[in-house]
Amino acid sequence: MRQHLLYVMSPSRLDGTSKAIERLGAKRIDDNAITITYELDHRMLKGISLRIYLLSDIDGVTPFLRHHPVDLLVYDERGSGALEALQAVYKIARDVHSLAQLWGPDFHFPMSRIVTVLNATPDVDHRVFSLGRINVRDVLVEPKKTALMLRWLHNLLYAGIVRREKVGMALSGGAIEGLLYQAGTVLALKHAFKGRDIYSCDAISGISSGSIVGSVVANGLEVEDMIRGILDMKSRLPAFKLTTLFDLAGFDIVKRVFNTSLRMRKLKPSQWLESTLESIPTGFFKGEKLEAYLHELFAEYGQGDKFKELSTHLYIGATDHDTFDHVTLGKAPFDNIAISAAVRASCSIPPLFTPKAIGDRYYIDGQVTKSCNLESVVEDGACLVFVIDPMKPIRSTTAGISDIKGGYFSLLQMIKGLVSTRFETNFHAVAEQYPDVDFIVFQPDEECARMMAGSPLKPRIRPQMIEVAFQNTLRRLRERHKVYAAKTVRFGFELKSVEELRKLEGNYHKIIKFQE
């Protein structure tokens, strides 16, 4: 098992540290990095192969993290000219935060993957306490022997960070445009790897539109057939049309308006406004056609419409309409219901869709209370999680652009901004809580985000949106190829070469073309 360790120190210690590592039998390699790089296999590491990167410039940490995998970052404050550990960690945290703001949450590096080596100063106990408060994983004070360092690193990399082969996928929501983006992203991931593929995920979670794509993958249904059904092409699966989603709740609307009008006869004029507001339905569409479509899809073409019939653990997030608690359907006591009913509940966003009754409770869209259900797949044991989050607002540097585009655009941007901010906050918290888990996050780039800012219901946009998401995902895999290849190979995924991924970008139409 190979682990990647970035060791940051002062220039005065670089030569001595290099010689100490070479005495352990490490082989120096040239990987065109800004570091001195070694490969170390040592009996004291007990089966762990260490790729060690020595860096003497703290300003190089963030550029290095952008293009290289790092399981553990060691900051050594010993030596002349080195920053005190607390100052150095704060600087690294600020730089990483700035990078994540620019490039997205996928570039977040958890503080819980940072450890420090300290000088034995009189105030060392206070400094150890201060580092612990900001979630630094561990501290070693003035080690005298290399053997002590190796045992310490082994405990951190093996006992502290346990690598299992479980893989998960977590899908956020995003209405119809989110569904299209996720379909294109899953298609790209399916074709980007050799060996193990995305359909071998051990656990999948989905919220809102993500519950549709997640349940399709969990049922083993080919995403190509799903896309063909959306695009009204020849497919092995039933066509997925707009009428599948939008079945008017005419009877419920008339009934509510009629009952309200009867009550208004007995009310004072001052109470009419309140009563009129109560006549607004909780949903204009029933969602029953979607539920029936998914039931047929899973029962007739997939593994089944029950959670326990799946080989993959599936978790679907929904919101209790009255308590506004987030519930995870697929976990006890909600593991005996139909998957199609759970998906309908997770997609019931008011006031578009009526709440879904399950038992004696009513449920609405899961994204009302949680942006993405990362915790479920991590708690299931996944140590590699593919995250697909379509809800990203357009970030424009042009002042007043939202005002120019009007209220509808501003409303969508506001909702996406709220959901996106909540996602990033939750993602950072989960990443800190589970430093043993690698996350690979896919979000729309600016081109895709601009396209998703319009109406996704226009037929001419729908195929283009899926294709752009497909290409956007492959570009991201190429840009950080070294990082993603190292993260995924541990779990049996062999990421195709940069050139193969580049060629794959142009094969979208060939891939989705129906073949007998």
Image (spheres, rainbow, N blue to C red):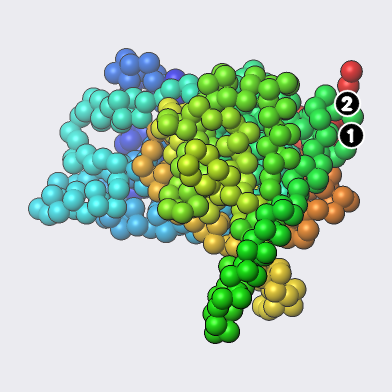
C-alpha distance separating marks 1 and 2: 8 Å
**Which residue is pictured at 29% across the width and 41% down the height?**
137
Whether residue 151 sits left or right of residue 412 in the image: it is left
- Tell whether label 2 touches label 1 (CB within 8 Å): yes
Q: Residues within 10 Å of mark 1 (few under 14, many from 20)?
A: some
Residue 284 appears in view: yes
Q: Nearer the viewer, residue 443 or 76?
A: 443
Q: Nearer the viewer, residue 470 or 76?
A: 470
Whether residue 419 sits left or right of residue 253 in the image: it is left
x, y percentage for residue 410?
A: 67, 70
Earlier residue among tags 1 and 2:
1
Q: What residue is disc 1 on?
A: 233
Label 1 secondary element: loop
Going by the numbered disc 1, the residue's amino acid type is Met
**Which residue is pictured at 57% across the width and 37% down the height?**
342
Q: What residue is disc 2 on?
A: 514
Whether residue 238 sits left or right of residue 47 in the image: it is right
Going by the numbered disc 2, the residue's amino acid type is Phe
x, y percentage for residue 157?
A: 35, 28
Q: Residues within 10 Å of mark 2 (few under 14, many from 20)?
A: some
Q: Is residue 151 above or below residue 128?
A: above
